[in-house]
Image: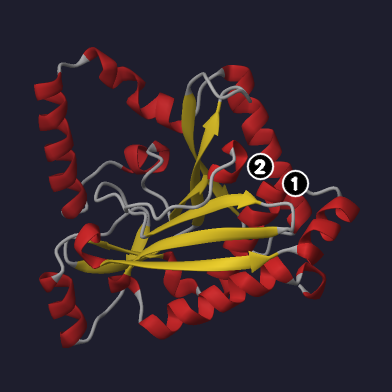
Amino acid sequence: MKRSDGVKINLETYQRVELVMMKNRQEASIFMNVDLHCEDLTAYLKEKEITLFSYFIYACLKTVELHPELNRFVMGNHLYSHNDLSLSTLVKQNKGTDGSSSLVKWTFGSDMTIDQVQTQVRKSISSIRNRQTGNSDKFFGWMKYFPTFLLRVLVAVGRILDNFNLLPASIIRDEPLHTGAVVANLGSIGLRAPFHHLYDWGTASVFIVMGKMDDHSNMQVTFTIDERIAEGVIFARALTTFQTLMEKPYEN
């Protein structure tokens, strides 16, 4: 049965065996990091009136567009390519350190400019903060009425349906972990970038953490990637692309 969010990729025998041997994303996770020197980016953002987070999202999107192998996911021992270009991130419903947060999924068009990305990001964040809700609230809100044992049953059933491509398209569309990648901006609360785990629920094969930028325009970014989606050389090339986008914005 076809999936609503992806197209199945035909694999060689050794690739199929690899998917069977590594049963989940935790087992298949690899960890990569890059230390960025963003003096040119700092000047670029000031000149163009672009926020750091908007440009970071833009750099992530462009990296995936140039290396589409990153926009894949494994489900039910099969490899799929996402139908769209989506990212999910955590948005605080107020700018303080307290208060609740909402996980939101953004779907972007191909070849979007940095201005278009910033406009979409700003509108979405403003909407979330004004409405005090987001994708995660919409999807998970009704679950608060269920006891824990029933939630476990629902999640288990959901996993089975997802593995056999039977999860309803409406759930896949709204559920924020059915996405291409998850981005966490820990720099916004003054933290360096730790390595984050991947979730075995949903379809996110990449988790990107953005650390704080110091007074010398240096920033650390970490990546956790499901190694089953592509060869290592693809990850290395993608990391170089991302670093160039971040460090040399005037050349892109």
- Image position, residue 238 (x, y; %): 52, 75
Quarter of the rendering occupied by the C terminus: bottom right
- Residue 43 image-quadrant placement: bottom right
Instruction: Determine the secondary structure under disc 1.
Output: loop
- Image position, residue 89 (x, y; %): 50, 42
Q: Do the residues bearing badges 2 and 1 touch, measured as CB atoms within 8 Å?
A: yes
Q: Residue at x 37, y 52 (%)?
A: 196
Point out which mark residue 121 bears. 2
Horizontal side, residue 203 vs residue 40: left or right: left
Q: Residue at x 73, y 58 (%)?
A: 217
- Image position, residue 130 (x, y; %): 64, 19
Horizontal side, residue 178 vs residue 21: left or right: right
CA gap between label 2 and label 1 equals: 10 Å
Residue type indicated by callout 1:
Thr
Q: Residue at x 12, y 38 (%)?
A: 157
Residue farthest to the front, as pictured: 215
Q: Closest to the observer: 212 or 207?
A: 212
Mark 2 vs mark 1: which is more N-terminal?
Answer: 1
Residue type indicated by callout 2:
Val
Quarter of the rendering occupied by the N terminus: bottom left
Q: Is residue 1 visible?
A: no
Q: Is residue 108 above or below residue 146?
A: below
How is the model colour-coded? secondary structure
Residue farthest to the top, as pictured: 145
Horizontal side, residue 57 vs residue 152: left or right: right
Q: Is residue 100 above or below residue 164?
A: above
Q: Is residue 85 above or below residue 166?
A: below
The residue tagged 1 is: 51
Mark 2, residues whose alpha carbon is within 10 Å: few (<14), some, or many (≥20)?
A: some
Instruction: Determine the secondary structure under disc 2.
Output: helix
